[in-house]
Image (tube, rainbow, N blue to C red):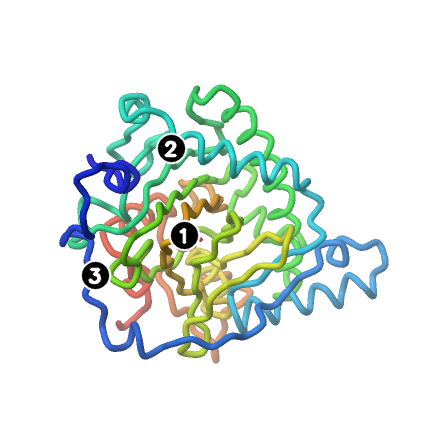
Amino acid sequence: MFSVKELVESSTMVSVPSNYVCHKTPEDSMLYYETENIPTIDFHQLTSSNSNERSKAIQQLGDKCRDWGFFMVINHGVSETLREKVLREGQSFFDLSKEEKMEFAGKKILDPIRYGTSFNVMVDKTLFWRDYLKCLVHPHFNAPSKPPDLRETLEEYSRKGKEVVEELLKGISLSLGLEENYIHKSMNVELGCKMLVINCYPPCPKPELVMGLPTHTDHGLLTLLQQNQLGGLQIQHKGKWIPVNPLPNSFLIITGDQMEILTNGKYKSVVHRVVVNTKGTRISVGTAHGPNLDTIVSPAPELVGDDNLALYRAIKYRDYIYCFSKTMNSKQRLIWNV
Ligand code: OGA
Ligand code: NI
């Protein structure tokens, strides 16, 4: 495996190798760019003991999930020190020698620790300008033993992130008219599969020729994401690509495919992609919070009725992940009659 980082650092790279050059479709460039304000959810309000304030925040949360599938969370209570540490130590993993990193090269999609490159090298026809480290952090915590402080930092970060996401899941359950712990219980979030991904996008001499990550959706319920100072994430909203410029100290939340299935399409997973830049290495850290791997996910019976038929087939989360690994558009396969 040749990582993008090693490619960029090798003196032999004079231009972008042809296997990284993306053939962009007309839609890729047509859907250009609308600068719109990304919605914000105030975590402080969402957890307020003032019930008026909380209801208002829950309603907003539901509206944003329905209209965007994407939002920033402010006042989340996770310290900037910890967030910066994760980005710094995440980056330092990629600074290890090639031999050290290769100790963690995983082959299979659910390997507890997996260092790799591109999106899925088994199926990618074009390679993507990204290296990654994926760790299953829940229900069992896994992380590399080096660099020395990484493990401890990721453990604390995962714990803090879990608290934020579980509060959001409560708010989302309520916004759907369900009981507060509905998603928690029905998806067995207590033993949920959480996968933390550190993405490393080295600078590229010709960013317009490549993609950091292709157009895709995330597979879990919600992904909690933060990035260093370099942007590059774009989300699709009403047929346009919107570049994401998060507020300082905010987390980004991406709605995933299991949320779409569970809500019978009311809250759709958001389509997104990543572009790269010439200036420097972009680091992002995302944690996909999903159901337990053995949970069968189907539209919530409470959200389905005679005039609102189930649009998705039931599937075990583990099977969904395997299906997702082979295609970027796995969700389409689950929609009835498609
Ligand atoms: C992902 C992803 C976005 C980013 O890892 O699935 O979409 O900003 N990452 O790196
Ligand atoms: Ni994603």
Q: Distance between the residues labelled 1 and 3?
A: 20 Å
Front-most of residues 221 and 245: 245
Q: In this view, does 140 lie above or below 294?
A: above
Q: Residue at x 37, y 65 (%)?
A: 312
Say if residue 236 shows up in the picture.
yes
Give x and y (percent) for residue 143.
Answer: 44, 27
Question: Tag 3: residue type?
Answer: Cys
| Callout 1–callout 3 Cβ contact below 8 Å | no
Q: Which residue is drawn at 72% across and 52% down?
A: 75
The image quadrant where one finds the N terminus is top left
Query: Residue 32: where, in percent of width, then height?
Result: 38, 76
Which image quarter holds the C terminus? bottom left
Q: In this view, does 66 lie to the left or right of 143?
A: right
Location of residue 72 in the rendering, given as x and y in whole percent from the top left corner: 60, 59
Which of 270 and 166 lies nearest the eye of the viewer? 270
Relative vertical location of residue 237 with respect to residue 106 in this rendering, above or below: below
| Residue 279, numbered circle | 1
- At mark 1, the secondary structure is loop
Residue that carries the numbered disc 3 in the rendered image: 22
Query: Could you tell which of marks 2 and 3 lies nearer the N-terminus?
Result: 3
Residue, disc 2 = 94
Of labels 1 and 2, earlier in sequence is 2
Residue displayed at 33% across by 54% down: 212
Q: Residue at x 43, y 21 (%)?
A: 146
